[in-house]
Image (cartoon, rainbow, N blue to C red):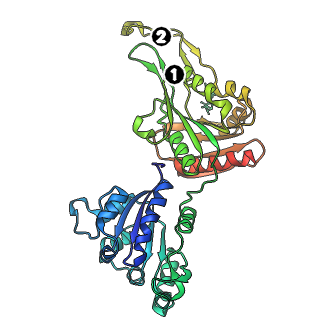
Amino acid sequence: MSQIGPEIVLGVGGGIAAYKSCELLRRLQDRGYQITVVPTPSSLNFVGKATWEALSGRPVNTQVWEDVHLVPHISVAEKAKFFIIAPATADLIARLAAGRADDLLTNLVLASDVPKMLIPAMHPSMWLDAATVANVQVLRTRGFEVMEPVVGRLTGSDIGPGRFPETASIVYEFDQLTGNISDLTGKRILITAGGTRENIDPVRFIGNRSSGKQGVAIAKAAIRRGADVHLIAANVDENQVMGIETTHVVTTQEMHEALLERFPEIDILIMSAAVADAKPKWTSIDKIKKAMLGSIELVPNMDLLADISKGKTNQIIVGFAAETKDHLIEARRKLESKGMDVIYVNDVSGGAIFGKDQTMGTILTRNDADIAVKETSKDALGNLLLDQAIRQIG
Ligand code: CTP
């Protein structure tokens, strides 16, 4: 099971279909979603708190006055990237439409402005009642995604629209909303992240300011889209790469070896690591005394991309450029000279980008028009680059 999908809230209303949400929770977990379950108090008549806690592995509250010191209605709302409320009963839909905040779930809905999906389930006459129709209309105009219930057999003998849809179709619709799409299933993607370091002596090194955030964001986006991902991480914190299959390296030489080993087997290489351009001619075994540090003789490092791309068969290569001036000219030169198919160039003048969650730049390819990327998250850029790589594969 993937461990790195987006944080979501699974709200559960007080209808008999609540029991089907246990299966829904499991299938959403399979898709990598990190889930906090927030049942309404009345839904506990159908499925108890203990079941939700056991299945989600997290504490479960229904009211704002439980765990008050954690301010749950704000802390959970701040963390969640999406909401799915299943089943959404007629009463819950009415309370949401009225903007009420009389339990934890309705508080959370008000406190959060992320995309939300409702999966209504109720008796057909309740679903078709003018009050419910009007409430659903209100919620849709406010941006809620409301899935149509299925026509079929209800809990009793009645037949009509109101049935809770099949779990797979709910998961499919929710994936569309969250962008959790499996278009990279079967693709093997190798990603480098971080910055290589070259040792001067046992305590000093030549390095750079790359945090590894971009490469890790791409790796996570690729995993979410179903790819088989391997990360080569140069001096990236262990916690950052949790859940990603990773080879840790320190030096450019080590990164080169790791690349050579895996490149022949992959479909896409994304070279987001900042490689140290030079290394000391000698690495001292002992700590160099400061009096001797007036100059350090450097020799250039190998250009990893230029070297690896010589062995290219069908692989698509995506690279980066960090420039302080002439961004597009420099990016195109690097794209061509290093055998890349796609390059993302960003402006690093003034130390912008490094360690930040946002990025801004341009994507260039060999034949297509340049794509300007306005200030966007490194996660979103990861998805854009994966889209381009897939496009190049055709
Ligand atoms: N790169 C590489 N090996 C190197 C240096 C860079 O594979 N020794 C890769 C980077 O991972 C990146 C791309 O090449 O994907 C461009 O990196 P950048 O530092 O902008 O390129 P340099 O060739 O070092 O450019 P410059 O001449 O501007 O220093």
Determine whether 197 is above or below 107 in the image. above
The image quadrant of residue 278 is top right
Q: Amino acid at mark 1?
A: Thr
Helix, strand or loop at disc 1? loop
Identify the residue shown where x is 38% and y is 17%.
Answer: 203
Identify the residue shown where x is 50% and y is 41%.
Answer: 216
Identify the residue shown where x is 46% and y is 89%.
Answer: 126
Q: Pinpoint residue 150: horizontal percent, then vertical percent.
A: 56, 79
Residue receiving disc 1: 251
Disc marking residue 283: 2
Q: CA distance from mark 2 to mark 1?
A: 12 Å
Q: Amino acid at mark 2?
A: Thr
121 relative position to 50: left or right: right
Q: Pinpoint residue 211: horizontal percent, then vertical percent.
A: 46, 36
Between label 2 and label 1, give the one nearer the viewer: 1
Helix, strand or loop at disc 2? loop
Identify the residue shown where x is 34% and y is 63%.
Answer: 52
Q: Pinpoint residue 89: horizontal percent, then vertical percent.
A: 42, 80
Determine whether 82 is above or below 13 in the image. above
Instruction: Tell me the quadrant of ligand 1.
Output: top right
Crowd class of label 1 (few under 14; some 14 to 19; many from 20; radius 10 Å)? many
* Nearer to us in this view, 226 or 195: 226
